[in-house]
Amino acid sequence: MQQQILDMIQKYETIIIHRHVRPDPDAYGSQAGLKAMIKAIYPEKNVYMAGDHEKSLSFLDTMDHIEDDLYKHSLIIVCDTANRDRIDDQRYDQGKYLIKIDHHPDVDKYGDISWVNTKASSTSEMVCELFKEYLKETNPNYTDGARLLFAGIVGDTGRFRFPNTTERTFYWAAELIKYTFSRDELYNELYKTSLRLTRLEGYVLSEMKLLPSGAAYVNLPIETLQKFEVTSKEAAGIVNTFSTLEGLKAWVFFVEEEDVIRVRLRSKGPEIHKLAGRYNGGGHPMASGASVNTWQDTEEVLKELDELCENYKR
């Protein structure tokens, strides 16, 4: 399958790469890293990145403006997106050929080629595997691709702390840091925070509730976000604020927006992706997202999370 993908990349002169909405470092890293590698190997090809620009990730790369006509004869590659509804820029289906590259559970099968590997730490790691013969050369032309893919791996593994980190993950981290990019600068950009967000973290630590089952939660209504002058996207970025708490099994942030309440689920044991799937979401067994319409709905989510933790045996 990897060779089929490489053959398609070689075949098409115009390639448009998509990823999911509300991108994280792996979405950006795999998308931009894939583009950087293709351009380094085939400088004559036209390669574009689709989707809304995320200011907080601008240190990695920026999105391209793409005219509709470009799609007609293009190869489309969607990175890090389990289901079609979450693809940023819904023109993805207007191309000539569609490829899916993803490490989430394959709940929505799409694409002429669908390469899904749930054992990979990240989609960025999968892109490394795709270009393994090239990256091993330590060609200076691949430096930017290596920087972007390393950022994606670091982001999705929580700096190699999450259980999705494998021997293969460390292998690729070792290969990528052979390239001459500044890891210090990358880490500083990935984990810098504002005074506003730091104060919200203090609020979260004081307001979170831990249930006897080991489930924990915190509610962040719009009024609270406005008080701290923090967006819902920024609030979602501090979901691991109390992840080291003793006795914690799984937790949820309920973050209110104008027309929906975002559900940010994390776990240290109980598998939560099926729970997320029941509430318009999905993701990984240990990290998922969902959405509900009312605060009464959040009580149902919390009830199910409480039961999951209560029944979980290590």
Image: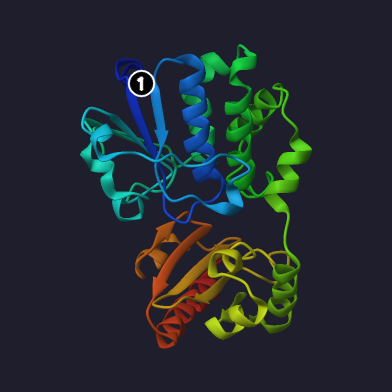
Expressed as whole percent of the image width and height from the top left, the position of residue 273 reads 44, 60
Q: Which residue is mark 1?
A: 9
Residue 98 vs residue 281, the one in the foreground: 98
Tell me what residue is drawn at x 53 percent, y 32 percent: 33
**Residue type, numbered disc 1:** Ile
Tell me what residue is drawn at x 46 percent, y 85 percent: 299
Tell me what residue is drawn at x 34 percent, y 67 percent: 280
Quadrant assignment, res 168: top right
Q: Is residue 131 above or below residue 94?
A: above
Quadrant assignment, res 233: bottom right
Residue 172 vs residue 46, the one in the foreground: 46
Viewer can see residue 257: yes
Residue 50 as seen in the image, left or right of residue 218:
left
Residue 104 as seen in the image, left or right of residue 208:
left
Find the residue positioned furthest to the right: 184
Viewer can see residue 246: no
Instruction: Point out the image quarter for the C terminus.
Output: bottom right
Instruction: Point out the image quarter for the N terminus.
Output: top left
Crowd class of label 1 (few under 14; some 14 to 19; many from 20; radius 10 Å): some
